[in-house]
């Protein structure tokens, strides 16, 4: 669902506060008004999810002093200054200090609304980026993104925790859409380099000369550091490692061989695609391959993850249902089996697309999982052919049972009594099944 657009209005004139507040409220904003800068500062926190509109001339602490305090507290907070006639030089100085923009009285209310909308959008991007950086530096948070109770995912999480503590270079391989970039971030976040820089570059995004310059020598630009230096002490993630030319491979190998032990910079190489008849060993020179593959992680394809398929589908469907303001589609036994039997050539990325489209079509009361999978199969016609291995009936039954209990617990927000009644299960049986499938009541309350 759409996040509220919040605006804090600071002005010592009551009529101005009220008129600005009323106009913005009619435009869909949530407003808070304050007569003094001191009152506003007492209420504002560094992660305030909105923007500030303040008059420049006020008794006590004026708008310029407030601007400095606000930007000292949170440098990315958009602050819009209201100026009187003749105060434009002061407004220009405010812009130099970091104000988002200014409005000169008398101003057009529609311009104020447009300016506030742009400022709110900038604030959202800033807070989202801040949250992402924080999340990617938090090993616990990022490990929670590696969802799944299947044995292969349990093993993957254990491997990440083990390899994250090691200091050697890592090679990550696996089919498209399996989450290799997420695993690279996780390896960095759970290890001793977590507080250092994580620098990522796609080797397929540059021509050979440009890539060499970007990695080792940025064309003599004094202000730019080569990525090798920018990542010093931390991690350099080389995506699409298979795209490296022979010259670039030789230069990278020289750098690796020149590093001290332990390495100044840990390299995590990600292979995103190679031809079906060629392995990564065929693409990379042997000496570089063995240096990078000293520690190797191969991600499991989605079709090998059993009941994780249904758990992931439910998770993403619920997320999209919340975003679109509707109910998540209920999955029956036949559709659950179709999800588990699908080859998923696009893996988790493809499943996310199917989950979103399932939510959109269920809003209209039309469509089916089978039709979505068929459409996706046609779109992925260029992908290599996949053979779907049969699964024992027991695996289908257990996956559907887990999904059913999970859905019911979510719907009843963790009420054990309500779940017992709906599923006609005794308390002890429900407890045993929840323990078996790794479901905890605290996740739903």
Image (cartoon, grey):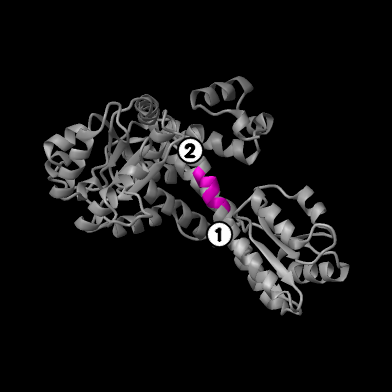
- Depth check: 410 or 42 in front? 42
Image quarter (top left, top right, bottom left or bottom right) of the C terminus: top right
Tell whether 240 sits left or right of 336.
left
Which numbered disc flags the more N-terminal residue, 1 or 2? 2
- Depth check: 58 or 190 in front? 58
> Which residue sits at x=18%, y=39%?
254
- Depth check: 108 or 187 in front? 108
Where does residue 401 sit, x and y in percent of width and height? 49, 33
Identify the residue under disc 1.
363
Where does residue 87 sit, x and y in percent of width and height? 73, 74
Q: Which mark is residue 137?
A: 2
> Which residue sits at x=54%, y=26%?
434
Question: Do residues under tags 1 and 2 come within 8 Å of each other at their CB atoms?
Answer: no
Where does residue 74 sit, x and y in percent of width and height? 63, 50
Picture quarter containing residue 392?
top left
> Which residue sits at x=85%, y=62%?
59
Q: Secondary structure at mark 2?
A: loop
- Vertical comparison of 79 with 392: above or below: below
Tell whether 324 sits left or right of 278.
right
- Range of magenta residues: 127-133
Number of numbered tags placed on the structure image = 2
Picture quarter containing residue 92?
bottom right
Tell whether 166 sits left or right of 368.
left
Where does residue 315 sit, x and y in percent of width and height? 51, 43
* Most common SS among magenta residues: helix
Image quarter (top left, top right, bottom left or bottom right) of the N terminus: bottom right
């Amino acid at each position: 669902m759409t996040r509220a657009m919040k605006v804090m209005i600071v002005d010592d004139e009551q009529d101005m506060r009220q008129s600005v507040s009323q106009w913005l409220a009619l435009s869909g904003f949530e407003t808070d008004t304050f007569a003094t800068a001191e009152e506003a500062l007492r209420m504002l926190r560094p992660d305030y999810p909105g923007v500030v509109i303040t008059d420049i001339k006020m008794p006590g602490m004026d708008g310029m002093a407030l601007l400095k305090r606000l930007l000292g507290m949170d440098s990315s907070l958009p602050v819009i200054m209201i100026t009187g006639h003749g105060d434009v030089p002061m407004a220009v100085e405010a812009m130099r200090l970091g104000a988002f923009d200014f409005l000169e009285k008398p101003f057009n209310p529609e311009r104020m609304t447009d300016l506030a909308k742009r400022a709110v959008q900038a604030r959202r991007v800033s807070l989202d980026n801040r949250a992402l950086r924080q999340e990617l530096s938090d090993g616990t948070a990022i490990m929670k993104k590696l969802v799944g109770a299947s044995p292969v995912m349990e093993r993957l999480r254990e491997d990440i925790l083990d390899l994250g503590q090691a200091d050697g270079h890592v090679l990550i391989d696996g089919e498209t859409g399996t989450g290799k970039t997420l695993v690279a971030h996780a390896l960095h976040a759970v290890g001793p380099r977590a507080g250092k820089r994580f620098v990522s570059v796609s080797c397929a995004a540059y021509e050979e000369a440009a890539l060499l310059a970007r990695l080792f020598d940025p064309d003599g630009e004094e202000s730019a550091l080569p990525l090798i230096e920018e990542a010093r002490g931390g991690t350099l993630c080389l995506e699409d490692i298979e795209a490296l030319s022979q010259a670039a491979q030789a230069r990278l190998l020289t750098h690796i061989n020149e590093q001290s032990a332990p390495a100044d910079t840990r390299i995590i190489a990600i292979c995103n695609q190679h031809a079906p008849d060629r392995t990564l060993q065929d693409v990379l020179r042997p000496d570089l391959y063995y240096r990078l593959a000293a520690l190797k992680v191969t991600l499991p394809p989605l079709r090998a993850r059993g009941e994780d398929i249904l758990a992931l589908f439910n998770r993403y469907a619920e997320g999209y249902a919340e975003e679109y303001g509707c109910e998540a589609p209920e999955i029956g036994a036949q559709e659950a089996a179709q999800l588990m039997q699908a080859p998923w050539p696009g893996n988790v990325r493809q499943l996310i697309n199917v989950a979103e489209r399932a939510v959109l079509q269920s809003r209209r009361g039309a469509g089916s999982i089978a039709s979505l999978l068929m459409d996706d199969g046609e779109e992925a016609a260029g992908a290599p052919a996949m053979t779907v291995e049969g699964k024992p009936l027991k695996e289908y039954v257990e996956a559907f049972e887990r999904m059913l209990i999970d859905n019911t617990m979510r719907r009843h927000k963790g009420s054990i009594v309500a779940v017992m009644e709906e599923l006609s299960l005794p308390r002890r049986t429900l407890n045993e099944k929840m323990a078996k499938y790794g479901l905890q009541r605290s996740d739903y309350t």
